[in-house]
Image (cartoon, rainbow, N blue to C red):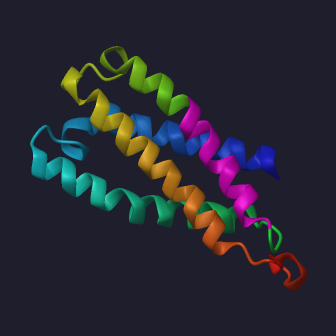
């Protein structure tokens, strides 16, 4: 299941990068208010995408967190690389937006991890401290 989740996570990351490549200045505008709106909207959008992806994967009860790790891992690794190579990958965006892009991509995939943890249903014997 983890390999399928990572494959789907790669496709999600690829779709996000393509969206920024073709509409980056709309998604992450240079003015402060626009960036703040993007940061506020990132978790709910990523939660919806991740929830749909987890349902598509049909993970077993209790494996939601593991599947979420598989979804988020490609985006976390490749997001760091894209942030480093920002001017080459996104020539249509202001090069000074690399930090904001890095923050938003990490925030989005951390939201996926959080959702996976929140959705995980533990067996009663697993809830001991």
Q: Is residue 110 above or below residue 123?
A: above
Boundaries of the magenta span: 63-77
* Residue that appears at 55% across and 38% down: 76
Task: Please tell me whether the stretch drawn in magenta is mainly helix, strand or loop.
Answer: helix
Residue 102 image offset from top left, x and y in percent: 38, 35
In this view, the residue farthest toward the bottom is 124
Name the quarter where the C terminus is drawn.
bottom right
Q: Is residue 79 above or below residue 58?
A: above
* Residue that appears at 64% across and 49% down: 71
Residue 105 image offset from top left, x and y in percent: 42, 42
Q: Nearer the viewer, residue 38 or 52?
A: 38
Residue 72 image offset from top left, x and y in percent: 60, 47
Q: Nearer the viewer, residue 9 or 108?
A: 108
* Residue that appears at 30% across and 27% down: 98
In this view, the residue farthest toward the top is 88
In this view, the residue farthest toward the front is 129
Residue 74 on the magenta segment? yes
Q: Is residue 84 above or below residue 25?
A: above
Q: Nearer the viewer, residue 21 or 64?
A: 64
Does residue 86 appear to the left or right of 111 in the view shown? left
Residue 45 image offset from top left, x and y in percent: 40, 61
* Residue that appears at 35% across and 21% down: 86
Does residue 54 appear to the left or right of 27 in the view shown? right
Does residue 83 appear to the left or right of 127 in the view shown? left
For residue 63, which quarter of the picture? bottom right
Residue 108 on the magenta segment? no
């Amino acid at each position: 299941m983890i390999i399928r989740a990572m494959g789907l996570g790669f496709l999600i990351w690829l779709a996000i990068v393509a969206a920024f490549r073709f509409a980056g200045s709309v998604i992450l505008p240079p003015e402060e208010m626009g960036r703040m709106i993007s940061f506020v909207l990132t978790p709910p959008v990523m939660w919806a995408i991740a929830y749909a992806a987890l349902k598509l994967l049909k993970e077993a009860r209790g494996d939601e967190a593991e599947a979420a790790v598989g979804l988020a891992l490609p985006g976390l690794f490749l997001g760091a690389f894209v942030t480093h190579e920002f001017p080459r990958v996104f020539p249509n965006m202001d090069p000074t937006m690399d930090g904001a892009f890095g923050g938003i991509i990490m925030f989005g995939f951390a939201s996926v991890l959080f959702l996976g943890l929140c959705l995980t249903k533990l067996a009663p014997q697993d809830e001991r401290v």
